Image (cartoon, rainbow, N blue to C red):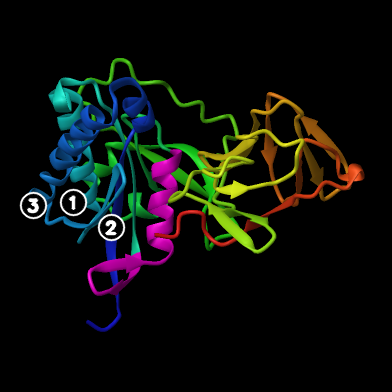
Amino acid sequence: MARQIRTMAVLFADISESASLYQKLGDTAARNIVNTCLALVTGVLPRYDGRLVKTIGDEVMCVFPSADLAVLAASEMQSLVSSTRPGNYPVAIHIGLHYGPVLMEENDVFGDTVNTAAYLRAAATAEQILTTGATEGCLSAALRSCVRPIFHAVLKGSAEESAVYQVLWRTDRLDLTDVNLHSGKVIPGDTGSLLVALGEERVRVDQWRTSVVIGRSQDCDLVVTDKFASRRHLSIKLVRTYFYLFDHSINGTFVSLESGEEVHVLRREMLLDGSGQICVGRSRAEKPSDVIAFTRDRRSLYRA
């Protein structure tokens, strides 16, 4: 099928804290619960002219012909998961959706609308649905009464702040938190993925690969040889839209920043921003055998 530009709503629904399910229940039981939850979510689609584009790990990506249908579907997804307890276990989902132009190719969709919906899914907390001011402007009058602005964000493709709206899907709103309209609340934007390189080896930390492990053990994502490095020396993880280095070692990790400052990280975490170098077990001044480079790829973190 040839490429087409169409206007539609893109929705991402993701199981909240799914990693903890696997840790608590084991792979088999957790996967059964995840599959039951995703089946419940996708079962909503036919009632709102929705189409499943793909399943990505523990989340689904789907599209709808209108903003109204996407909001109604998202609300039913939340209601069903909340009341049904998939697999007899308390599971929650978080949802991001955005209405706008997409590039269609075969059965997949691409573009800034997709990236924005994925970003809002990452920004949403458990049992929350987030959307954009542009989507709110396309809703019917009845559904506009069910959304409210709660944050601002700088979305991809724009240099200006945009309102981020919450969809109020619960019928009982007694426990709803009041929004302070007098405080300037700008949530972290989509500033791109993180590229990590050791010699010719490169890995990208993004929504598809949310963590990498570096150390001397052969099962690490990047294997170092320095004798001062621990077997599983450090990990780099995506936490919402930020990247953190976590040191697990005996000798610590030395991070050189763009300013020239070198920071010794020992059994703690450090925010990685911009670009720099990482030395495992000893300082850059000691001329270690392994130097790991990191830099931000400013293209969308949520390219889908």
Q: CA distance from mark 2 to mark 1?
A: 8 Å
Q: Number of labelled discs?
A: 3
> Is 145 within the magenta?
no
**Residue 242 falls in image quadrant:** top right
Q: Amino acid at mark 3?
A: Pro
Given residues 211 and 82, the one toward you in this image is 211
Query: Looking at the picture, how far across and down is residue 196, in whole percent?
Result: 63, 53
- Residue pictured at 75% horizontal, 50% vertical: 290
- Residue pictured at 15% horizontal, 35% vertical: 36
Residue stretch in magenta: 101-123
- Residue hosting label 2: 9
- Residue hosting label 1: 69
Q: CA distance from mark 2 to mark 3?
A: 15 Å
Q: Amino acid at mark 2?
A: Ala
Q: Amino acid at mark 1?
A: Leu
Residue 192 at least partly seen: no
Rendered-image quadrant of the C terminus: bottom left
Name the N-terminal-most of marks 3 and 1: 3
Give the residue furthest to the left: 47
State yes or no: discs 2 and 1 in contact (Cβ < 8 Å): yes
Q: Is residue 191 left or right of residue 89?
A: right
Name the N-terminal-most of marks 2 and 3: 2
Badge 2 element? strand
- Residue hosting label 3: 46
Residue 89 at least partly seen: yes
**Residue 6 falls in image quadrant:** bottom left
Name the N-terminal-most of marks 2 and 1: 2
Tag 2: Cα neighbours inside 10 Å, few (<14), some, or many (≥20)? many
Badge 1 element? helix
Give the residue furthest to the bottom: 2
